[in-house]
Amino acid sequence: MAKRHPALIPVAREHHECLILAQRLMRGARVPDGDWPRDPVQQAAMLAEFFKRHLRQHFAIEEALVFPAACSAGSEAGALVLQLLDEHRDMESRVEQLAANPQVMATELAAFGELLNAHIRLEDRQLFPLMEAGMSADALLELQRRIESHYGDGQGLVRF
């Protein structure tokens, strides 16, 4: 992970945990991990639980705090925010569909993992650097204060 402004560290830490999930989904039954089921239906259930317990809250924090702040970093950041919001809605819809499908296919889970992976990489590699370069020091400190008030200890919440 690149050196991040402290305002973005809690969100970036959660991204690491989401990347683990994305890799597991993309690898499916080939994951050499005793904690990851081989059955796609069980994998979809784990995804739904992860979404319910962690990812939904992560998206909410991004949408309430990070994305509005990012829009102040310029038009390129604003355009990325619109794309990222669309991806949030797409992932929410896909999780519901996957969890409700008793015939879920490994390819559908892998596609979700690819989307999640690309989404996180877009935030980490493009949006966050634009924010760090385009926002004032005061605006970044205010964002940091607001994010830390949501996380309490500023460490992030998701652990997979």
Image (cartoon, rainbow, N blue to C red):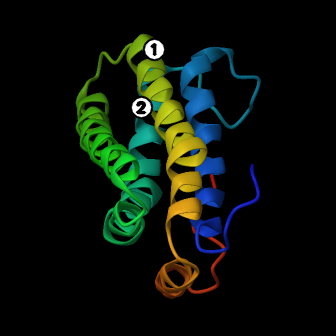
Mark-to-mark CA distance, 2 and 1: 9 Å
Dot 2 and dot 1 residues touching (CB under 8 Å):
no
Q: Where does the image place residue 75, in percent across and percent down from the top left?
A: 33, 51
> Is residue 72 positioned above or below 43 on the image?
below
Mark 2 surroundings within 10 Å by alpha-carbon count, few (fewer than 14), some (14 through 19), many (20 or more):
many
Labelled disc at residue 44:
2
Mark 1 surroundings within 10 Å by alpha-carbon count, few (fewer than 14), some (14 through 19), many (20 or more):
many
Labelled disc at residue 35:
none
**Which residue is rendered at x = 47% and y = 49% of the image?**
50
**Which residue is rendered at x = 58% and y = 60% of the image?**
133
> Is residue 160 positioned above or below 150 on the image?
above
Is residue 57 or residue 41 the one in the foreground? 57
Q: Of label 2 and label 1, which has the lower sequence position?
A: 2
**Which residue is rendered at x = 24% and y = 43% of the image?**
89
Q: Kindly state the secondary structure of the residue where label 1 is placed.
A: helix
Q: Give the number of marks.
A: 2
Is residue 108 or residue 49 the one in the foreground? 108
Which quadrant of the structure image shows residue 45?
Answer: top left
Residue under label 1: 106
Q: What residue type is labelled 2?
A: Ala
Q: Which amino acid does label 1 sit on?
A: Ala
> Is residue 68 positioned above or below 1 on the image?
below
> Is residue 74 positioned above or below 41 on the image?
below
Q: Where does the image place residue 56, in percent across and percent down from the top left?
A: 36, 57
Q: Where does the image place residue 136, in percent across and percent down from the top left?
A: 52, 76
Is residue 34 or residue 156 the one in the foreground? 156
Residue 32 seen in this snapshot: yes
**Which residue is rendered at x = 32% and y = 52% of the image?**
78
Q: Kindly state the secondary structure of the residue where label 2 is placed.
A: helix
